Image (cartoon, grey):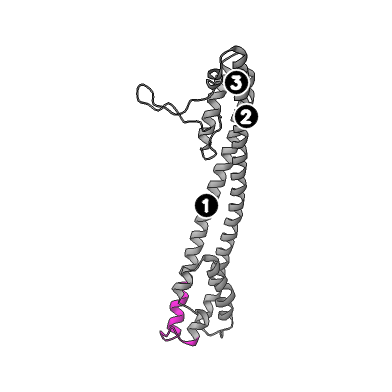
Amino acid sequence: MRRLSTTSSLLVYLEELEFTEATLSAREDTKELACPFRDEIETWERVLKNYREARRAIVRADALVSVRDQELDEVTAKFSRALLAESNGDRKSTLFRRFFPDTPSELIRKPLRKQCEHTLNRIVPELNELPERSPLKAFAKPLAEAAQRAVDALDARAKVGAERASVALDVEEWKDGVNRLRTSTYAALLQMGTEKGLGKAFARSFFRAAKRVTAKGNPAGPADTA
């Protein structure tokens, strides 16, 4: 009993902590039980800060990958047009297929890392093998740079993703700790209520009741889950 769903937001957890801390602090015979709740409220600020920073970091990492992807696509498209001109418009020519076994559009549609690998491991080395007088050779550097920037962005996003996973685990552990506190406090209040001859109603009064509609038709607040 008194456990909150682990899928509930951090804001819901804060509100529940605030409610119970306030009710416990309002009575002389329970005010000592409020201290751990105040500690969790202070910890909540750190947990939320880390959570928001992790979400922000992954959004920005996604944005950078998107930009690097587009940049690589642009230079690849320019190169494919120049290559097609050099191949006299023949996509099946030996020269064209030297760089694109399939079509350039198919390469662009591949996952970004695979596109980068093909660019760095096949297109760029083949370009470097061309004679210096070839107009295609000038594409070697921009293609290599664009592909490497994309790889770097992918690697950075993977790192941020791992850090976000770690933060998510911290959040889950904190939520579990809050639920353990709520459960143990409820048990202590049950014992106190029994000693006072007040029953379960006493213990329940320190936790917000399940969501209900008031006489005025307004929701009374988020529910606890059993």
How far is disc 3 from disc 2 in space, using C-alphas?
A: 14 Å
Q: Quadrant of residue 187?
A: top right
Q: Disc 2 marks which amino acid?
A: Leu
Local SS, label 1: helix
Q: Position of residue 192 (x, y in %)?
A: 62, 17
Local SS, label 2: helix
Which segment is the magenta one?
A: 75-94
| First of labels 1, 2 by sequence position | 1
Q: Is 38 contained in the magenta span?
A: no
How far is disc 1 from disc 2 in space, using C-alphas?
A: 36 Å
| First of labels 3, 2 by sequence position | 2
Using residue 217 as the reference point, say whether residue 124 is left or right of it.
right
Residue name at image x 51 percent, y 51 percent: 59
Examine the rendered structure and indicate whether residue 170 appears above or below residue 114.
Answer: above
Q: Main structural element of the magenta stretch: helix, strand or loop?
A: helix
Local SS, label 3: helix
Q: Position of residue 54 (x, y in %)?
A: 57, 46
Q: Position of residue 115 (x, y in %)?
A: 53, 70
Disc nearest the viewer among 1 and 2? 2
Q: Provide the residue designation for mark 1.
A: 60
Q: Provide the residue designation for mark 2.
A: 181
Examine the rendered structure and indicate whether residue 208 appears above or below residue 77.
Answer: above
